[in-house]
Image: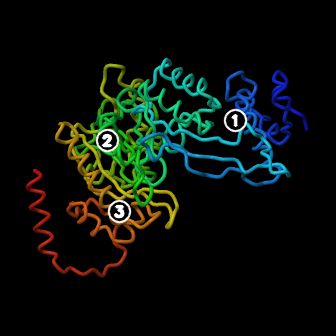
Amino acid sequence: MSNTKLNSERPEVEDISTPNLDELEKGPWPSFVSGLKRLAKDKHEGAAMAKGVLGTLEQSYVTRKGYWKGGTVGVVGYGGGIIPRFTELKNADGSYMYPDAVEFHTLRVQPPAGNHYTSTMMRQLVDTFEKNGGSGLIAFHGQSGDIMMQGATTQNVQKIFNELNEIGFDLGGAGPAVRTGMSCVGGARCEMSLHNEGKAHRILVNQFLDDMHRPALPYKFKVKVSGCPNDCMNAVHRSDFAVIGTWRDDIKINQEGWKAMVEDKGRQYVNENIISRCPTQAMSLNDDDSLEIRNKDCVRCMHCINVASPLSQKYVGLEGDAILAQGDDTGVTILCGGKRTLKIGDSMGTVIVPFMKLETEEDYEALADLAQEVLDFFAENALEHERTGEMIERIGLNNFLEGVGLDVDPNMISSPRQSSYVRTDGWDEQAAKWFENKSAAA
């Protein structure tokens, strides 16, 4: 195995052999090791830190142990947003093996809604981090959705934050707090967009800013916004409060475009790739090759639209309507409780509002108020280290809905009852209440 000379131009920093990390640079794919080596060879102040991190990582590959521990690091007025990391890797005499990498803190920085950047904006972020002693290692974006500025000392964290604030950026959430919100690219680039994702994102971030910067919750609380049921933000299964664009009228069909597609692709292709893959079998191909959709059975999975819409330009031209498209009566569905494995296994979000319009300022205020109700209930009723989904599982959906001021709705059902035996106590009263609510909504 080779001995990699990382920094022969800087004799004050000894060369480090990284035979195990060198293996990760082999093959056709880009390697993060190459990026770290490039930073270690650079002339910026944090280059020596990057070099020490390479040495620490190499040591971990040799011993199969991790050498980073947490701690407490922050900026003035904030209780979160910084992920502290201190090394435990020492020589036999107790001295640090890589003195330049004793501290390697990460700043979580909130991205713009929809991750819309200009090249100037990105250059400002990079320069701000590097010129204030940062390692230069930045991830766009971490699993949390943040811009991850990885590698800063306790002394430099405040300086980096101050300059980020001056160019319009703020820290995100960390610890038992509301975490950084995320939203998809939305209507700026995507024809599937069904609401103003950026505005919904901004409204929710502003609503929760204090809870994001000053951790005081039982555990983390994530908010994600997707523009349509494709859910590019993974909001349904990764966030405690998910806002998903949807529609409640019929799917729009361009029958001429559909027939042209069937004629070209063939009935077998259409049946195998679109019709038969409808999860509720709500689609039928008629004898004249026209399409029939039983919209009351549609669950908004988006499969048929995803397959047919990209072919619209070929069969109807640039000026024609899409072969299949969402309806015109658009809004959002709100779900709560999505999460990865913690106290219980992975869980998808549970529908708590089947449909909500997001058009007027009052609509957005209602969204913010509901989100605050959910957060307040979570803060008061969740156990320590318990996510929203686990809390709902423990106390029951009925109690949760009552606590946040929502009525039970048949559209909240996630799966049919498996037992045919059911108690009907109070059935008539609940049915009357449902019809009253339906009439009031109309």
Q: Is residue 65 above or below residue 48?
A: below
Say which of marks 1 and 2 sits in front.
1
Is any atom of residue 324 visible in this view?
no
Please, what is the three-letter code of the amino acid marked with disc 3? Ser
Q: Which residue is mark 3?
A: 414
Residue 322, horizontal then vertical, whole percent: 33, 30
Q: Which part of the image, by quadrant, shows the N terminus?
A: top right
Is any atom of residue 82 visible in this view?
yes
Give me the disc on residue 291: 2
Give me the disc on residue 292: none
Q: Earlier in the sequence, mark 1 or mark 2?
A: 1
Task: Using a 10 Å C-alpha cutoff, classify the residue at mark 1 as few (fewer than 14 neighbours), some (14 to 19) or many (20 or more).
Answer: few
Say which of marks 1 and 3 sits in front.
1
Say which of marks 3 and 2 sits in front.
3
Q: Which residue is mark 1?
A: 32
The residue lying toward the viewer, choosing from 416 and 68, is 68
Secondary element type, mark 1: helix
Residue 392, horizontal then vertical, whole percent: 36, 66
Secondary element type, mark 2: strand
Q: Is residue 109 left or right of residue 280?
A: right
Q: Earlier in the sequence, mark 1 or mark 3?
A: 1
Residue displayed at 28% across by 41% down: 251
Please, what is the three-letter code of the amino acid marked with disc 1? Phe
Q: Is residue 40 above or below residue 293?
A: above
